[in-house]
């Protein structure tokens, strides 16, 4: 099945210009229920939404109703999990800078919270909504820009490293590329077995394999997938999984950090072309997948692939900060120790949780 292009405008989602509203009576009535679930789930939003009662309810609701319900859950959750809320707000303050007013910070916080809820709603849709309705959604509401870039890269016969980030409707990228006919291997981590099994079943219908980078060593299997000519979908902003170069730094959203070497290692060993893509949300429940070629010179300097992909991601986050949902992890870079200098006067970051 090949997706048809559609006309779409208005890429960036505006930050809502309104103050935080109080919880409604219905939200307050639901809050004790979700409070009990949250306590049993150790206040983990993802595990809370992937619990059996949530899945049972989600699978029976219309998407508009389930998105509204997740908004209620999200409001209750972040009013309970003060630690995560504080981490996100600290990251947003650092991102906006010292001149940002409290009103600006809170407006961005509201939009970021909404984007986080959108992400989990899309994740649950991929797991528990019927496949035919998901395909209909993609055919009706998705535009792909730069598909020729991916097609040319795939035609080289060495597989393609498709790099993306925790940004926008990233959960829809594998389905959209599978519907275009590409054989896929995608990195995915699930916090519940029932969601993983649901995704594995749907992936099997589209010649797609799943790898979990947080529970297994995936380098050999990733290289094998590329050798088979597959498109390998991976994310460049797994901040808690970075393996930095000892003497290369990067400015990530204004925070200095050691440059992760994972992508360069994969590209160097596979000799596969690299494509960068993000799935942007747009008004009226529409989506736009934008693909970019990542040029790799024959004698590319070490770190060039990772730096190019992270630079592209940062540009998009600065334009649409509400679309990135990893703000809580940025605190790792904010709290990291400052870089030191070795005997050759090269910056070296001491090992820390941010680069573990």
Image (cartoon, rainbow, N blue to C red):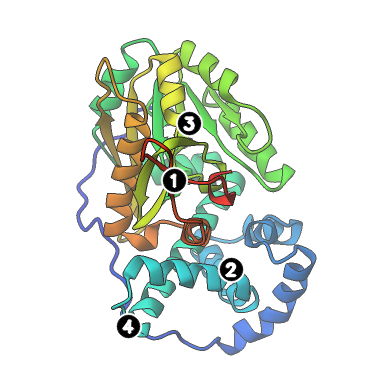
Residue 39 appears at what percent x and percent y? 77, 70
Other residues around mark 2 within 10 Å, as few (<14) / some (14–19) / many (≥20): some
Q: Which mark is residue 101?
A: 4
Element carrying mark 2: helix
Q: For the C terminus, which image quadrant?
A: top right
Other residues around mark 1 within 10 Å, as few (<14) / some (14–19) / many (≥20): many
Q: Which residue appears at 36% of the width and 40% of the height?
A: 345
User: Between 106 and 45, which is closer to the camera in this rendering?
Assistant: 106
Q: Is residue 126 above or below residue 70?
A: above
User: Between 248 and 176, which is closer to the camera in this rendering?
Assistant: 248
Marks 3/4: CA–CA distance = 37 Å
Determine the image quadrant of residue 324: bottom left
| Mark toward the start of the polypeptide (1 vs 2) | 2
Q: Which residue is mark 2?
A: 84
Marks 1/2: CA–CA distance = 22 Å
333 vs 278, left or right, is: right
User: Between 62 and 128, which is closer to the camera in this rendering?
Assistant: 128
Q: Which mark is residue 170?
A: 1
Which numbered mark, 3 or 2, is in the foreground of this view? 3
Marks 1/3: CA–CA distance = 20 Å
Q: Count how many numbered circles sit on residues in the image.
A: 4
């Amino acid at each position: 099945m090949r997706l048809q292009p559609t006309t779409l405008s208005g890429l960036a989602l505006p930050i809502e210009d309104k103050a935080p509203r109080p919880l409604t009576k219905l939200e307050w009535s639901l809050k004790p229920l979700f409070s009990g679930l949250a306590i049993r789930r150790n206040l983990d939003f993802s595990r809370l939404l992937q619990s059996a009662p949530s899945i049972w309810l989600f699978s029976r609701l219309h998407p508009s109703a389930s998105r509204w319900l997740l908004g209620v859950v999200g409001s209750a959750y972040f009013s309970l999990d003060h630690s995560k809320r504080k981490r996100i707000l600290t990251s947003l303050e650092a991102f906006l800078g010292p001149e940002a007013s409290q009103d600006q910070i809170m407006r961005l916080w509201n939009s970021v919270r909404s984007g986080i809820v959108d992400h989990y709603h899309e994740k649950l849709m991929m797991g528990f909504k019927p496949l035919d309705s998901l395909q209909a959604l993609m055919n009706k509401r998705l535009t792909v820009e730069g598909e020729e870039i991916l097609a040319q890269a795939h035609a080289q016969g060495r597989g393609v490293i498709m790099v993306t980030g925790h940004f926008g409707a990233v959960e829809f990228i594998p389905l959209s590329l599978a519907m275009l006919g590409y054989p896929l291997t995608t990195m995915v981590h699930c916090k519940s077995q029932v969601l993983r099994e649901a995704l594995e079943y749907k992936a099997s219908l589209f010649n797609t394999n799943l790898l979990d980078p947080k529970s297994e060593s995936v380098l050999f299997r990733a290289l094998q997938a590329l050798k088979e000519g597959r498109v390998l979908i991976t994310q460049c902003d797994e901040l808690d999984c970075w393996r930095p170069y000892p003497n290369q730094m990067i400015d990530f959203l204004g925070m200095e950090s050691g440059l992760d070497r994972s992508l360069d290692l994969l590209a160097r060993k596979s000799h596969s072309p690299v494509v960068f893509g993000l799935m942007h949300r747009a008004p009226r429940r529409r989506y736009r997948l934008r693909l970019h070629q990542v040029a790799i010179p024959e004698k590319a300097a070490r770190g060039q692939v990772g730096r190019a992909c992270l630079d592209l991601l940062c540009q998009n986050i600065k334009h649409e900060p509400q679309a990135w949902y990893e703000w809580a992890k940025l605190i790792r870079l904010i709290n990291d120790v400052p870089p030191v200098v070795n005997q050759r006067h090269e910056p070296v970051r001491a090992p820390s949780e941010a680069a573990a």
